[in-house]
Image (cartoon, helix red, strand yellow):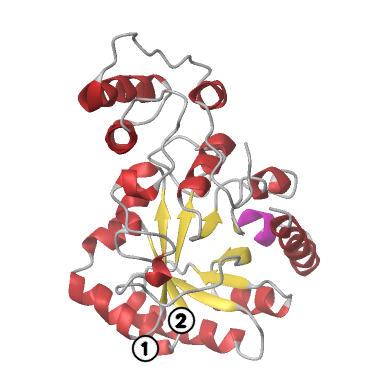
Amino acid sequence: MNHDDTPAPATVATCSERLGNAAFDTPADVHGAEHAYRTARQNCLRLGFIEVDAECLARAWQAQTVRTGHFDDQAWPEAPEDFGMSPLPPARRADAFAPCPERLGLYAVLPDAAWVGRMARAGVPTVQLRFKSDDAAAIAAETRAAVAAVQDTDALLFINDHWQAAIDAGAYGVHLGQEDLDALAPEHLQRIRSAGLRLGVSTHGYAEMVRADAVSPSYIAMGAVFPTTLKKMATAPQGLARLGAYARLLRGQSLVAIGGIDAERLPDVLGTGVGSVAMVRALIAADDPEATAAELTAAVAAGASLH
């Protein structure tokens, strides 16, 4: 699959081979958008897409059929307008969150402020504090400590989940999961936006990407790319072929790949066109985290620049 800046339609045969080793079965009598929808939905389910993603893809194929005037089973939907999305990149939209670099580089997800400081001083360009606690005072203190820890470094700091603490402490941005995003009232999202914080959102397939894109975030995280034991995932690993398809749909958006990525898998992940790779265990479980961080930071920067 092509990874340059020009649209490169991946044939359904290619996608089906990589995604599910299943042929895309197109009846000879497919005529009209409704038939295209039913055919695409059935075959996307056969390819292993969960129901909401198969529905999302089928509706996009239906829209593509209406837009082009014919059903093409070799044209995997890649146009944002066919998914009901506004033009990309989101920074052009009136409701956009503050932009962040399209290439965030190595993105370290870390358990506390001490780790944030270590990785920031080691040269990791993007760090996230994923501090797990129900104690509001502890959350506020750890967030303030993380903000202080990246001062005098070039690291960009995102705070996982705790958006109000991130605003209060003056963090660079906040990262939300789908459930956290859905739980926020519009006025809360506006509070984050008005404070100038960047917003990153986790996604696990087409339907969640469309949902995340609707709020015009600063970046979209996509995963889990490979199996991971760090979090219980509701969806199966996405794999490289799907990651590449997602990246083509979201051209112009800042994209972060996450889930089971290590140094060995890094070149293939970057080959999909994403500009950032998030890592957790590869850093905090390393014998020499600082040296590993330096090596991975350089590898991500070099690999991303080639695509």
Residue 81 or residue 55, whichever sits in front: 81
Which quarter shows the N terminus? top right
Residue 253 magenta-highlighted: no
| For residue 121, side relative to residue 216 (left or right) | right
Residue at 29% from the left image edge and 73% from the top image edge: 95
Give the residue number, with chain letter if any, for mark 2. 143
Residue at 34% from the left image edge and 25% from the top image edge: 71
| Rendering quarter of residue 53 | top left
Question: Do the CB atoms of the residues marked 2 and 1 lie less than 8 Å apart?
Answer: yes
Q: Main secondary structure of the magenta part?
A: helix
Q: Type of residue at label 1? A: Asp
Q: Nearer the viewer, mark 2 or mark 1?
A: 1
| For residue 145, side relative to residue 186 (left or right) | right
Q: What element carries label 2?
A: helix
Give the residue number, with chain letter if any, for mark 1. 168
Residue at 32% from the left image edge and 79% from the top image edge: 192
Q: What stretch is highlighted in magenta?
A: 279-284
**Residue 252: numbered disc:** none
Q: Position of residue 263 (x, y in %)?
A: 74, 50
Residue at 37% from the left image edge and 20% from the top image edge: 43
Instruction: Give the Cα distance between marks 2 and 1.
Output: 9 Å
Q: Position of residue 209 (x, y in %)?
A: 37, 50
Q: Position of residue 50 (x, y in %)?
A: 35, 31
Q: Position of residue 90 (x, y in %)?
A: 40, 66
Identify the mark nearer the N-term, 2 or 1.
2
Residue 280 magenta-highlighted: yes
Q: Type of residue at label 2? A: Thr
Q: What element carries label 1?
A: helix
Q: Is residue 279 visible in the rendered structure shown here?
A: no
- Structural crowding at the residue carrying mark 2, measured as other residues with C-alpha within 10 Å and reported as few (<14), some (14–19) or many (≥20): many
